[in-house]
Image (spheres, rainbow, N blue to C red):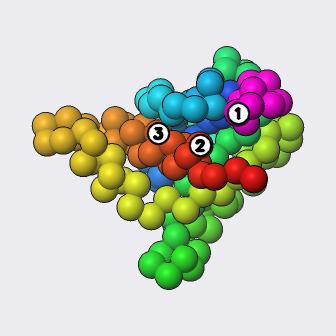
Amino acid sequence: MTDAGRGGGALLALDVGDRRIGVAVSESGVIAKPLGAVERTGRKATLDALEALVRQYDVRRAVVGLPLLEGGVAGEQAEKTRAFVRSLQRRLPGLEVVEWDERHTSSEAREILGPGRLEPGRIDSVAAAVILQEYLDQPRG
């Protein structure tokens, strides 16, 4: 049985950036689907939008891309992401959050989209789908 099937609900992935957060979902626990991006217009509005998605899709676990530096070290952007995750967990204490190494996901998203389809938001959402698909494809034991 998939993760989504075990606890009910869907899996959500977040690609957290300074201006927007790319979002993807997997309702089946098998395939990740880009949902779009949430513009970061303020902490409350951003958390409201994410809470609405968590409720809409009955999400129990969020996979958050952690932008590690080469060598797997957490730099300034990773710490900003962790601070945002703490805010999200305060808002949604029942939401399990898994950090996922997101190095190279934006470049993978650009490759998937191809030239001419690289508008802001779309890259973020596809990067979130890449994060989630990598998570879903990992061997479980």
Look at the image and give the residue range highlighted in magenta.
1-9
State yes or no: discs 3 and 2 in contact (Cβ < 8 Å): no
**Is 112 on the left or on the right of 67, as rendered?**
left
Read off the residue under disc 3.
129
| Of the pair 126 and 16, the residue shown nearer to us | 126
What is the three-letter code of the residue carrying label 1?
Thr
The answer to whether marks 1 and 2 mark residues whose Cβ atoms lie closer than 8 Å is: yes
Judge left or right: residue 21 versus residue 80.
Answer: left
Crowdedness of circle 3 by 10 Å Cα count: few (<14), some, many (20+)?
many
In the picture provided, is 29 more to the left or to the right than 17?
right
Asked if residue 6 is among those painted magenta in the image, a careful observer would answer yes
Residue at numbered disc 1: 2
Residue 98 to residue 26: above or below:
below
Q: Position of residue 44 (x, y in %)?
A: 66, 37
Q: Amino acid at mark 2?
A: Leu
Identify which residue is drawn at 80% across, 31% down. Answer: 6
- Tell which residue pokes out farthest to the front in this image: 141
